[in-house]
């Protein structure tokens, strides 16, 4: 797509409303309610379910033509009442989409002045119009709304820290960071925590997340001894906690690679005033050894990357750290790129890294694809993969190196067959 063109042929951007709904999957007994037409809710639910491979409770007000024109005041009130009566959630996140936001629907006023008196249920408005931002922006907005409305002041809880993981971290990544925090004798409050709500451990069917960060834990985020925000998308949420509750804020990029993981460990050392345990030091040595083992194979390889902001910066930084050449398209906000851009740049390269929508491009160009980001729906296990920290970076490094090896032998075999006329 030419920079001067307004045409997007194969968009990389994903809806911010979907990002907000994804964040709410990490809040115990919460449910996302789209104020939108039926198709918006249906398609969003399909994408989240395909990516997570878990049942996702995503509901909508399902407004038709008349409410779209005249206003969906009654639909919002009725749907909130129905949802609370049927599912008994602890929180309902009413997500404004393009349809309601373009019209100027005052959803916040509806909730504030006409909120139904429903016991044990908090109702919050999360504005996520599709013409502003992308998936990670909607995710971040949801977290900011939760902090603004639920975090409370009080005496400091020593050794408790807030962890704000960006949307690009997998369920496995979040659990890895939690384990590293716990290794420093710190108690993490993760907002949101999808590592326990969408990890495949649910024993019964429910439209609500049966685990995750609960409302009481969110309230205590204002009393934590420090906040650690991971990824640029979470920086503003961390600053809200810092400015409002006067607590230390530590901010790091996605800890993919040796240098950024070292930064994470330094932050945890400062917060806890403890040295890293032997387990973490051993994984660092393993990563360094793995980098030495693979550097002759990966150095100089040319990689095209098409991902949203936080994961794009993390993966790009790691590839450069390993001596690879990086090009690609970015999908964020109104500067959204297009997978057509990625296809133009990926010709004659060694690897393409993007979500499952890059499969057709990979097949057309004959370039191996490493699936990453959102959504990944055509392979198993993506949500539980670990690519952060020393251990996760080593996993990623071996994953990439093995792709290069397999591709080398496949090309050699293909050339051999062509040489022999087979």
Image (tube, rainbow, N blue to C red):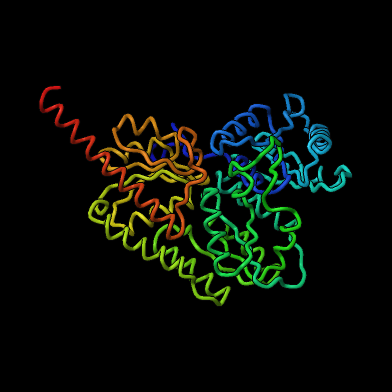
Among all residues in the image, which is located at the extreme right?
A: 117
Viewer-proximal residue among 229 and 197: 197
Image quadrant in which the N terminus is located: top left
Residue situated furthest left in the rendering: 420
Residue 15 image position (x, y, % from top left): 57, 39
Quadrant hosting residue 251: bottom right
Q: Is residue 177 left or right of residue 23?
A: left
Left or right relative to 212: residue 405 = left
Residue 303 in sight here: yes
Which residue occupies the foreground of this view, 124 or 196? 196
Instruction: Answer left or right for 345 relative to 105.
Output: left
Quadrant for the C terminus in the image: top left
Q: Closest to the observer: 369 or 102?
A: 369
Residue at 31 percent of width and 42 percent of height: 403
State how many labels appear.
0
Residue 384 rendering spot, x and y as whole percentages? 51, 45
Look at the image and tell me whether residue 8 can be seen.
Answer: no
Q: Residue at (32%, 29%) from the top-left corner?
A: 364
Instruction: Tell me residue 286's x, y (percent).
Output: 36, 62
Residue at 61%, 68% (x, y): give it: 186
């Amino acid at each position: 797509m030419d920079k001067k063109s307004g045409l997007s042929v194969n968009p990389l951007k994903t809806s911010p409303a979907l990002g907000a709904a994804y964040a709410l999957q990490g809040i115990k007994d919460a449910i996302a309610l789209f104020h939108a037409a039926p198709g918006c809710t249906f398609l969003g639910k399909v994408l989240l379910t395909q990516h997570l491979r878990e049942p996702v409770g995503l509901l909508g007000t399902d407004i038709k033509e008349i409410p779209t024109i005249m206003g969906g005041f009654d639909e919002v009130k009725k749907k909130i009442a129905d949802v609370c009566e049927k599912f008994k959630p602890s929180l309902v996140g009413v997500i404004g989409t393009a349809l309601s936001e373009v019209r100027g629907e005052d959803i916040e006023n509806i909730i504030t002045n006409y909120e139904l008196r429903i016991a044990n249920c908090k109702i919050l408005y999360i504005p996520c119009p599709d013409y502003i931002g992308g998936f990670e922006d909607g995710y971040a907005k949801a977290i900011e709304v939760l902090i603004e409305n639920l975090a409370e002041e009080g005496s400091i809880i020593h050794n408790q820290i807030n962890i704000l993981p960006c949307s690009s971290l997998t369920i496995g990544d979040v659990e890895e960071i939690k384990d590293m925090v716990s290794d420093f004798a710190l108690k993490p409050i993760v907002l949101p925590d999808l590592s326990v709500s969408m990890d495949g451990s649910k024993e019964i069917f429910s439209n609500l997340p049966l685990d995750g960060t609960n409302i009481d834990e969110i309230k205590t985020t204002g009393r934590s001894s420090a906040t650690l925000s991971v990824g640029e998308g979470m920086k503003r949420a961390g600053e809200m906690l810092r400015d409002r509750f006067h607590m230390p804020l530590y901010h790091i990029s996605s800890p993919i690679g040796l240098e950024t993981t070292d930064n994470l460990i330094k932050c945890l050392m400062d917060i806890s005033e403890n040295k890293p345990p032997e387990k973490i030091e051993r994984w660092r040595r393993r990563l360094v050894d793995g980098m030495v083992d693979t550097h002759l194979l990966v150095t100089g390889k040319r990689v095209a990357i098409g991902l949203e902001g936080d994961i794009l910066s993390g993966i790009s930084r790691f590839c450069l750290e390993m001596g690879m050449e990086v090009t690609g398209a970015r999908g964020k906000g109104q500067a959204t790129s297009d997978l057509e851009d990625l296809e133009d740049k990926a010709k004659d390269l060694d690897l393409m890294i993007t979500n499952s929508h890059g499969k057709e491009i990979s097949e057309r160009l004959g370039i191996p694809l490493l699936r990453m980001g959102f959504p990944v729906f055509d392979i198993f296990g993506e949500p539980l993969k670990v690519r952060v920290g020393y251990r996760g970076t080593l996993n990623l490094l071996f994953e990439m190196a093995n792709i290069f090896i397999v591709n080398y032998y496949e090309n050699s075999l293909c050339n051999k067959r062509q040489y022999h006329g087979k």
